[in-house]
Amino acid sequence: MLAVESAWKGLELIIQDIVDRFDLDGDKCIEFGVEFGYSTVALSNYFRRVTGVDLFVGDIHTVHKGLHFDETRASLSRYENIEP
């Protein structure tokens, strides 16, 4: 997991339950709203390929409002199955 603040913390514990409940094959996952990548990394533990989609300009619901694509891309670069 990434060491970043996230409202997603703890939710990674239920991903397997969701995958099982909906009989997902674990091949591909698209995530809308990557922000700093916490949930993207969580999902990458359950899917062979994860594609993250985000504007990377911040969110009205978070304190971060600046462009952070390069920072997030660098954080996710070590995960081979994540495509930013």
Image: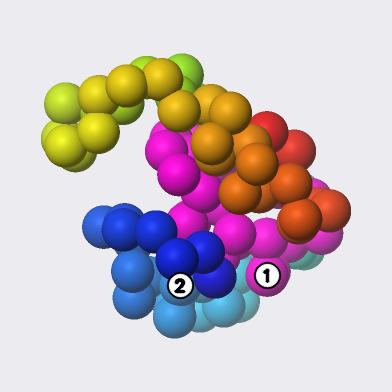
Q: Quadrant of residue 83?
A: top right
Tell me where residue 80 appears, x and y as whole percent: 84, 53
Q: Quadrant of residue 64?
A: top left
Tell me where residue 55 appears, x and y as whole percent: 46, 19
Packing grade of label 2 (10 A; few <14, some 14-19, many >=20) is some
Packing grade of label 1 (10 A; few <14, some 14-19, many >=20) is some
Residue found at x 68% / y 69%: 46
* Left or right: residue 63 compared with residue 22: left
Residue type of the residue flagged with mark 1: Asn
Q: CA distance from mark 1 to mark 2?
A: 9 Å
Residue under label 2, please give it: 12
Tell me where residue 71 appears, x and y as whole percent: 54, 36
Point out the image quarter for the N terminus.
bottom right
Residue under label 1, please give it: 45
- The answer to which of marks 1 and 2 sits earlier in the sequence is 2
1 and 2 marks in contact (CB < 8 Å): yes
64 is higher (above) or lower (below) than 39: above
Q: Which span of residues is magenta-colored? A: 31-51
| Residue 53 visible, this orientation | no
Which of the labelled discs sits on residue 29, or is there none?
none
Residue found at x 51% / y 64%: 2
